[in-house]
């Protein structure tokens, strides 16, 4: 037996006794004796000195056992109890409620921020944009997808409800804009009535963005739509919004308040609207959606701050949030033909879907959207915000050896 | 908000106000440290012990982990707030592109080269992918080693992740490349051997468990031997992918930051590449990947492994990353002023735009690339884009008038014609009234501007 083998044998004997069953009080080593209490056995140090074979057979299983005894602290999901909640707003009214809609939608009602803290009582709702004139400039990929129906708003509304199963439509009466066709309000009302007849889902009435004409338009629309509980989209500080609020109150509609990416301006406007007699259940707010790549981070911050403030009790921010996710199409990455970016028919809808989903994850309850593919994907995905977290279809480990 | 106060930090500084770090006082330096605008090493008067204490105090609740070394090194994690408006997010998540050991060598090399060369220009920045994940599909250590070799040989500065459930396969990869690649996935089944392998090679280790409790247990074991961990709570695949995955990531992050649950205080890893195998249609696979990854970039993904290299699919993800990881404390604006595009003279058109960084870059790039000579008058909208500032009232006649005066535009050109953005059409009258200049409404998008200017005869404007 060589010197090395003798050392190994000795080490093995020593280890066996140290690690052995029943424990040992004392190990006699030639003429040296060591009290076991004094012997600090660092397995890692020993491991480096040991021949691999001895390590594998004796030390490793014990080292593993020791590791298995690692203390695992108890884990509780970090569910926060919030003191505030978001109001629930109903769009549309059925016959029994004084309207003529077949179904209604409810927005908001959140009592938590993340799904693990509590699923949303009403997952985000998608509303499909319909314009009363194609002259507004419809992005190529959408025109290609929708075809000729964009020439007629009634046909457009009917088609998207039937084909894509959307829950709400938004009729943008942009032809009334003095800068576009300057169509009379009466003409727009005719379109609105035709659309209300053609589809039985709740309807949002959109203006043209002209601060004077929109007031006339909304006041008249409130009267024309009496009982239908439409949403008037939208009012802001630059217009005589009090008249619109009064009309909404008189005829039982919802108003959408708008402020340009600013929490305080949003809050101030909401406060004025509530003080004028509408309740939180009659108001939805739009704090501006900047497209992906064009300031979406501002929208992320503003919506997050608004929703957290609502849950922490700020009653002037406790309304559902609406997002003009269609703004995604303002991004050139969505519509521009640019070879190095790949085909725009894939890029555009994806751009819109990502914009909409980003704001929905931050708090948006209503998503105004444009492209059928984006609408379908977003509806299918965000439905899960209203349920307990699901898992288990497939995981990465199913695909790697 | 950061939990550590500047005062706590100040107590550990020399309090000499020597100025060597570039700050006038130690208190100013302390504030910068808390805001992550300076490093402890910037102070030359701290000994190793004091430095160590300071680093410990300033350590973010999400550990900062580096993967690989040298040119291939990427840093992930390091966040300390749940929401970006509370401070800022740090270390934009690297995108690793998956290559597979069952690919033919040519095919593999070609994908590696495409990943290495991938780039898209956006707002004055080059967007790229950051790494390669070599994935074992065969379970054969030799094939894996060969794939790692090809990946390393044909890439220069991409980080490397080695992906297999078998420690033996990973070890064969480490024989080829041992400069701290990410090893992944450590699961309940292979736990002890994987931890041992990562410890032995001092590599960062990615843990995978589909339930948070199981991930906690894995982390508790791994932490005994390995400092640098990444957490994958099981990227969900299917229609619930976006909501369920982002929600798990949010749960981890909230537990780590708000409940100070240390075992979850590591960067996260998201894997979207399996869609390549789940979807028959490659376009659908890339769409799903892009959609899921973009959402996860918003919600706490610190590193991603993707399959697609389609620019249309990567563009949303990389753009989202660029946006979400800008520092909200720094306004996204350029200085208002009269900018020269090309070589303008007194007959050149004056175009008006806003001082939002992105707006400015888009307009300037479009005009420059079309070789237009013009003046670009950038007005102060507080860093807001055209449509937003028109709606918000920052883009109005008064603002244009002030800019015309401040930057002496009247002296630069002989004519009195302004071209405003198409999206500012609503303020045309207001601008005309306030300035007395003739206002022409330009295009909806600046990419159409050069053609518009030419068609309208605005490239050279004669007096009057």
Image (cartoon, coloured by chain):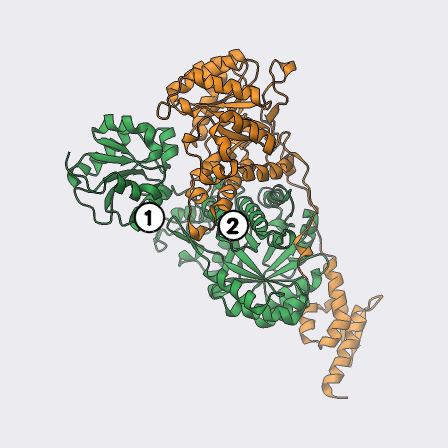
Q: Label 2: few (<14), some or many (≥20) within 10 Å?
A: many
**Residue B69 in the image: x percent, y percent?**
50, 65
Instruction: Kindly identify which chain the residue marked by label 2 belongs to.
Output: B
Q: CA distance from mark 1 to mark 2?
A: 23 Å
**Residue A178 in the image: x percent, y percent?**
35, 22
- The residue drawn where x is 26% and y is 29% is B431
- Image colour assigned to chain B: green
- Image colour assigned to chain A: orange
- The answer to whether B46 appears left or right of A164 in the picture is left
Q: Which residue is mark 2?
A: B313
Q: Label 1: few (<14), some or many (≥20) within 10 Å?
A: some
Residue B365, which numbered label? Answer: 1
Instruction: Kindly identify which chain the residue marked by label 1 belongs to.
Output: B
- The answer to whether A9 appears left or right of B385 in the picture is right
Image height of A26 relative to B40, above or below: below
- The residue drawn where x is 49% and y is 27% is A152
Image height of B408 relative to A321, above or below: below
**Pointer 1 with pointer 2, Cβ within 8 A:** no
Which is more toward the observer, A358 or B27? A358
- The answer to whether A297 appears left or right of B231 in the picture is left
Whether residue A317 can be seen here: no
- The answer to whether B76 appears left or right of A36 in the picture is left
Residue B60, which numbered label? Answer: none
């Amino acid at each position: 037996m060589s010197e090395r083998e003798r050392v190994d044998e000795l080490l093995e004997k020593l280890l066996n006794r140290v690690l052995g069953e029943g424990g040992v009080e004392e190990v006699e080593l030639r003429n040296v004796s060591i009290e076991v209490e004094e012997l600090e056995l660092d397995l890692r140090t020993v491991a480096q000195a040991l021949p691999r074979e001895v390590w594998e057979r004796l030390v490793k299983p014990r080292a593993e056992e020791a590791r298995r005894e690692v203390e695992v602290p108890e884990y509780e999901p970090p569910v926060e109890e919030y003191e505030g909640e978001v109001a629930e707003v109903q769009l549309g009214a059925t016959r029994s409620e004084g309207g003529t809609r077949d179904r209604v939608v409810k927005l908001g009602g959140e009592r938590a921020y993340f799904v693990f803290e509590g699923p949303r009582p009403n997952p985000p709702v998608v509303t499909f944009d319909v314009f009363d004139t194609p002259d507004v400039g419809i992005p190529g990929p959408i025109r290609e997808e929708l075809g000729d129906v964009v020439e007629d708003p009634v046909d457009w509304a009917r088609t998207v409800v039937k084909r894509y199963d959307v829950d709400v439509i938004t009729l943008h009466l942009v032809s009334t804009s003095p800068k576009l066709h300057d169509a009379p309000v009466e003409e727009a009302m005719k379109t609105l009535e035709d659309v209300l007849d053609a589809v039985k889902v709740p309807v949002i009435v959109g203006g043209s963005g002209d601060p004077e004409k929109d007031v006339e338009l909304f006041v008249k629309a409130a009267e024309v739509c009496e009982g239908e509980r439409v949403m008037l989209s939208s009012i802001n500080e630059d217009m005589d919004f009090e008249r619109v609020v009064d009309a909404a109150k008189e005829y039982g509609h919802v108003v959408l308040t708008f402020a340009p990416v600013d929490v305080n301006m949003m809050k101030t406007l909401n406060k004025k609207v509530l003080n004028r007699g509408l309740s939180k259940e009659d108001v939805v707010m739009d704090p501006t959606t900047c497209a992906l790549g064009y300031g979406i981070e501002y929208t992320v911050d503003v919506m997050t701050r608004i929703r957290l403030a609502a849950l922490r009790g700020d009653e002037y921010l406790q309304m559902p949030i609406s997002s003009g996710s269609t703004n995604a199409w303002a991004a050139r990455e969505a519509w521009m033909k640019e070879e190095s970016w790949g085909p725009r028919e894939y890029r555009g809808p994806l751009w819109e879907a990502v914009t909409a989903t980003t704001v929905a994850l931050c708090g948006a309850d209503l998503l105004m959207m444009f492209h059928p593919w984006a609408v379908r994907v977003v509806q299918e995905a965000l439905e899960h915000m209203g349920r307990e977290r699901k898992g288990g279809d497939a995981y990465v480990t199913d695909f790697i050896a | 908000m950061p939990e550590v106060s500047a005062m706590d930090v100040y107590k550990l500084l020399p309090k000499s106000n020597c100025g060597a770090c570039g700050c006038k006082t130690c208190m100013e330096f302390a504030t910068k440290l808390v805001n992550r605008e300076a490093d402890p090493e910037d102070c030359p008067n701290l000994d190793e012990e004091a430095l160590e204490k300071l680093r410990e105090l300033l350590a973010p609740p999400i550990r900062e982990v580096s993967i690989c070394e040298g040119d291939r090194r990427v840093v992930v994690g390091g966040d300390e707030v749940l929401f970006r408006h509370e401070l800022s997010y740090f270390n934009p998540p690297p995108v690793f592109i998956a290559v597979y050991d069952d690919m033919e060598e040519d095919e593999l090399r070609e994908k590696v080269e495409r990943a290495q060369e991938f780039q898209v220009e956006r707002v004055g920045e080059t967007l790229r992918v950051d790494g390669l994940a070599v994935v074992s599909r065969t379970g054969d250590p030799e094939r894996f080693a060969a794939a790692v070799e090809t990946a390393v040989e044909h890439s220069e500065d991409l980080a490397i992740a080695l992906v297999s459930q078998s420690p033996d396969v990973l070890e064969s990869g480490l024989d080829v490349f041992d400069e701290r690649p990410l090893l992944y996935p450590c699961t309940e089944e292979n736990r002890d051997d994987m931890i041992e392998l990562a410890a032995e090679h001092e590599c960062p280790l990615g843990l995978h468990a589909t339930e948070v409790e199981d991930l906690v247990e894995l982390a508790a074991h791994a932490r005994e031997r390995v400092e640098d961990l990444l957490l994958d709570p099981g990227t969900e695949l299917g229609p619930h992918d976006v909501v369920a995955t982002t929600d798990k990531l949010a749960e981890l992050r909230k537990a780590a930051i708000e409940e100070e649950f240390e075992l979850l205080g590591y960067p996260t890893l998201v894997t979207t590449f399996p869609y390549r195998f789940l979807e028959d249609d490659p376009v659908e696979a890339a769409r799903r990947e892009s959609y899921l990854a973009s959402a996860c970039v918003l919600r706490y993904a610190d590193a991603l492994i993707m399959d697609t290299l389609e620019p249309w699919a990567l563009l949303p993800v990389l753009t989202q990353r660029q946006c979400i990881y800008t520092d909200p404390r720094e306004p996204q604006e350029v200085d208002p002023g009269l900018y020269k595009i090309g070589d303008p003279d007194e007959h050149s058109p004056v175009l008006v735009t806003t001082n939002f960084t992105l707006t400015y870059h888009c307009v300037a790039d479009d005009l420059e690339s079309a070789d237009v000579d013009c003046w670009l008058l950038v007005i102060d909208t507080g860093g807001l884009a055209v449509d937003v500032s028109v709606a918000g009232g920052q883009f109005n006649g008064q603002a244009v008038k002030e800019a015309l005066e401040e930057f002496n535009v009247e002296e630069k050109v002989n004519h009195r014609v302004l071209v405003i953005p198409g999206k500012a059409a609503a303020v045309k009258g207001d601008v005309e009234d306030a300035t007395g200049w003739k206002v022409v409404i330009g295009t909806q998008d600046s990419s159409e501007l050069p053609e518009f200017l030419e068609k309208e005869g605005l490239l050279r404007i004669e007096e009057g």
